[in-house]
Amino acid sequence: MNPLTRRSSLALAALPLAAPPLIGQTLTKLRVSVIPVLDVAPLHAAIREGYFAAEGLEIDTSTTAGGATGLPGLVAGQFRLVFSNTVSILLGIREGLDFRFVAGAAAGTASPPDIFGILTRKGTGIATGKDLEGKRIASNTRNNIVWLRGMAWVEKTGGDWRKVNTVEVPFPQMADALAGGQVDAAIFSEPFVTGALASHGDRLERIGWPIHDTAPGSTVAQYVAMKEDVERNGEVFERFARALFKGVDWVSARRGDPALLDLIAAFSRVPIERLRQVALPAYPKAVTVAEVQEVIATMARFGMGGRFPAPASLIFRTANA
């Protein structure tokens, strides 16, 4: 062997072992419906850190106004996966739509600060659900997880939820509607809780933690797909879950880290300064029978009951992390 060839061989032997190159490999594209909230941070982390690409997946995110908005697109085949709140998913299932939970997404934390908050104007004397009877309360939509936990808080603090008038107001307009007197109270989700208190702190105050005060640590949202799709293409969804769960680990290891705040600011467009004050959700990987049963039971208490399949049948194997 001549010296040049020998040196080349030694240099190649010294290189670290690497994964096979993806050159020429076609990535499987998955279109995922999301909303720009804190709950989807692990998905964006997995995209940015290359976890999906390493699984041979290309994630095409489509942003919608709310989790329920993406579900019709899932049924129509516009999306392969949708991030949505648990109540909207279960209402679709109750109506016969074959949604399947593919992965967990967000849950409340075991102790305050909560990711949901009930705010009212200072000086109104409103402090409990009883005080809200006959009054107007804003929710981004009716019959979703925000509204459900808000009504549970009304009940828990002595009020009759049937006597509270719900007004649908998008989160970005909620603080102005409350400060301007169009509603008497509002159920906010982060980062809008922190934003409302930052922009209208002289006029608004928080009076409750809807999740912590009624069902600490309870579920909020998941990723779902259609039953037929996950049964035919289970291996694709397994790859999705593996990459997403690495994103969960990345986010969970960086709470309070500037790198996580930079990531969230990029997709949510919430300033870093405000994110430093925001309460983050818990990021579960699994979806459990117990959490689905709890939501179904709570829905029944607040006028959204009906016949549901056995919760275990709704959870695809990827969500048994």
Image (cartoon, rainbow, N blue to C red):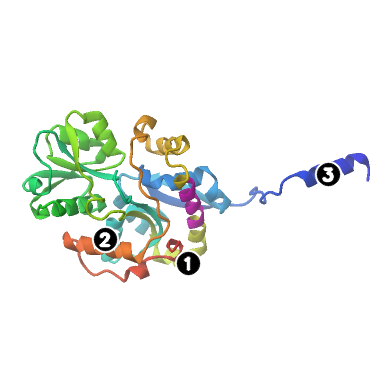
x then y, percent, for residue 56: 56, 53
Most extreme residue toward the right, as rendered? 2
Q: Is residue 48 left or right of residue 212?
A: right
Give the amino acid type for the residue marked by disc 1 in the picture.
Arg
**Residue at point 12% right, 40% down?**
184
Residue 143 sits in quarter: bottom left
Q: Can you tell which mark lies on residue 295?
A: 2
The front one of 203 and 224 is 203
Q: In the image, is residue 114 above or below residue 233?
A: above
Q: Is residue 176 left or right of residue 106?
A: left
**Residue at point 45% right, 34% down?**
258
Could you tell me how far apart the alpha carbons at marks 2 and 3 are, in whole angstroms?
Answer: 62 Å
Magenta stretch, main secondary structure class: helix
Q: Can you tell which mark lies on residue 232?
A: 1
x then y, percent, for residue 13: 79, 47
Question: Within 10 Å of the Cα at label 1, are there few (<14), some (14-19), or many (20+) other Cα atoms?
Answer: few
Q: Is residue 45 left or right of residue 1?
A: left
Q: Nearer the viewer, mark 1 or mark 3?
A: 3
Q: Can you tell which mark lies on residue 12?
A: none
Q: Secondary structure at mark 1?
A: helix
